[in-house]
Image (cartoon, helix red, strand yellow):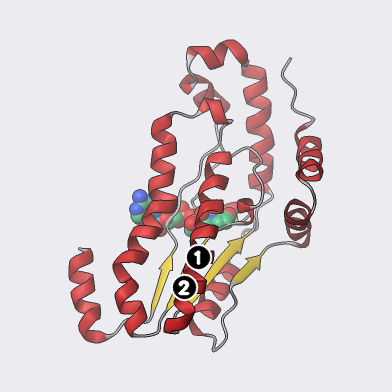
Amino acid sequence: KPKCLLRHFSSSGFWGLVNNAGISTFGETGWLSMEKYEKFTDVNLLGSIRTTLAFLPLLRKYKGRIVFMSSIIAYFALGNGIYSMTKAAIEKFCDALRLEMKKFGVQVSIIQPGNYARSTKIQPPVSAEEIWNELSEEEKAVYNKEYVQERANFFNNILSEGSPNGNEVVDAMVDALMSPAPKARYMVARLKEKALVLVCALFPTAVMDFFLSYALSKVKLT
Ligand SMILES: NC(=O)c1ccc[n+]([C@@H]2O[C@H](COP(=O)([O-])OP(=O)(O)OC[C@H]3O[C@@H](n4cnc5c(N)ncnc54)[C@H](OP(=O)(O)O)[C@@H]3O)[C@@H](O)[C@H]2O)c1
């Protein structure tokens, strides 16, 4: 299929590539299997890299645009480090690519949405029971069902606060593709989300940990 697409675009011209595909999940680091880490890396990171490399010759030829879907969660991890790590990695991939593509007139933009969980299918509410059933015996011996339930409730509360309207994210994508002067980064998020990013990006790690630990302090392992 990519070969057919490449042949088609080679003859008709190619302007923009949006690397949008992504998956999400929830779980503390040790709760997730190595297979899950490999799958997330494959879809959220390598998938975008694969597509970019396939279309790079055409994008250079037509001085096109490349847009990547990151997330504000590239700056911090709060319950889904597996997702954060892929977004942080794609940000750095883009940073390198953006500088390298300038000389060819190819513009690279990153979209960093905040919480839009209620407007897409990416992360339905999680079930504590399912998470517990998937834990290894070692993890079950360390954690307990109440803790998993509390963590799931905490995460589901965050999801329920997500914006139900993703139009502004699409607007940012369109601007990145069509504007005469696209931005390197479009942070499409609420004020409080932007404030959290600012704290995580500019202050020492201890300050970020303080804020995030405070948020998590209601969930205790007893
Ligand atoms: N929703 C949010 O709150 C939020 C916040 C920040 C960033 N993002 C990012 O926004 C992007 C779009 O996500 P969304 O929220 O719109 O979620 P979504 O509704 O679940 O859409 C995800 C898209 O990724 C595609 N996809 C998933 N796995 C794939 C695979 N293995 N190969 C090819 N395509 C695959 C899906 O295709 P199918 O429909 O065919 O499965 C779907 O089109 C993602 O990169 C996500 O990380 C979302």
- Mark 1 nearby-residue class (10 Å; few <14, some 14–19, many ≥20): few
At label 1, the amino acid type is Ala
Question: Which quadrant is home to the C terminus?
Answer: top right
Side of 211 relative to 7 (left or right): right
Side of 117 relative to 195 (left or right): left
Picture quarter with ligand 1: bottom left
Query: Which residue is depicted at the point 53% across and 72% down?
Result: 109
Above or below residue 93? Residue 200 is: above
Above or below residue 124? Residue 148 is: above
Disc number placed over residue 96 in the picture, else none:
1
Residue 215 location in percent, x, y?
Answer: 78, 38
- Mark 2 nearby-residue class (10 Å; few <14, some 14–19, many ≥20): some
Of the pair 220 and 200, the residue shown nearer to us: 200
Q: Is residue 123 visible?
A: no
The residue carrying mark 2 is 100
Q: Is residue 88 visible?
A: yes
Above or below residue 6? Residue 203 is: above
